[in-house]
Image (spheres, grey):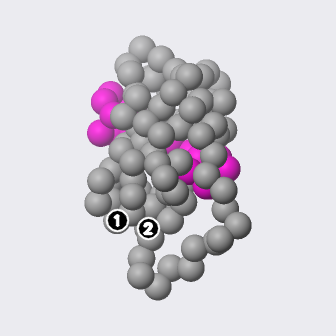
């Protein structure tokens, strides 16, 4: 499983640049660049959103990936040692991206 760094501070699952979700899905079936990908597991953190106090940040996650043109995609699973999910000020999943996406 990759070490995941998430800098999407507006995501409900982000805690200290780690993800508390347990596993994520990167979309981008026809991606040719990082901006063509997104974290489909993104949920916006809003003022009225309840945060689960029992969620624990995890640096290593199972990452399913639909960006089959990425060199790290192995049977729709990410094989990178380290990935970064970006999306400063994102309010929807489409405003996030897998910054580690690299065309094969």
Q: Is residue 64 left or right of residue 45?
A: right
Q: CA distance from mark 2 to mark 1?
A: 6 Å
Residue at point 42% right, 42% down?
A: 85
Secondary element at tag 2: loop
Name the N-terminal-most of marks 2 and 1.
2
Query: Which label sits on residue 91?
Result: 1
Q: Is residue 50 left or right of residue 83?
A: right
- Please rate how many residues cluster around mark 1, counting C-alpha atoms within 10 Å: few if below 14, some from 14 to 19, many from 20: some
15 relative to 27, above or below: below
Residue stretch rendered in magenta on the structure: 19-37
Is residue 92 among what the camera can see? no
Q: Position of residue 63 (x, y in %)?
A: 60, 38
- Please rate how many residues cluster around mark 2, counting C-alpha atoms within 10 Å: few if below 14, some from 14 to 19, many from 20: some
Mark 2, residue position: 44
Q: Position of residue 1 (x, y in %)?
A: 66, 30
63 relative to 22, above or below: above
């Amino acid at each position: 499983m990759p070490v995941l760094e998430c800098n999407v501070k507006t995501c409900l699952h982000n805690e200290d640049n780690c993800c508390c979700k347990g596993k994520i899905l990167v979309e981008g079936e026809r991606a040719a660049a990082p901006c063509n990908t997104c974290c489909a597991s993104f949920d916006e953190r809003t003022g009225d959103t309840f945060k689960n106090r029992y969620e624990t940040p995890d640096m290593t996650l199972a990452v399913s990936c639909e960006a089959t043109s990425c060199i790290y995609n192995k049977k729709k699973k990410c094989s990178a040692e380290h990935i970064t999910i970006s999306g400063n000020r994102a309010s929807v999943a489409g405003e996030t991206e897998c910054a580690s996406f690299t065309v094969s």
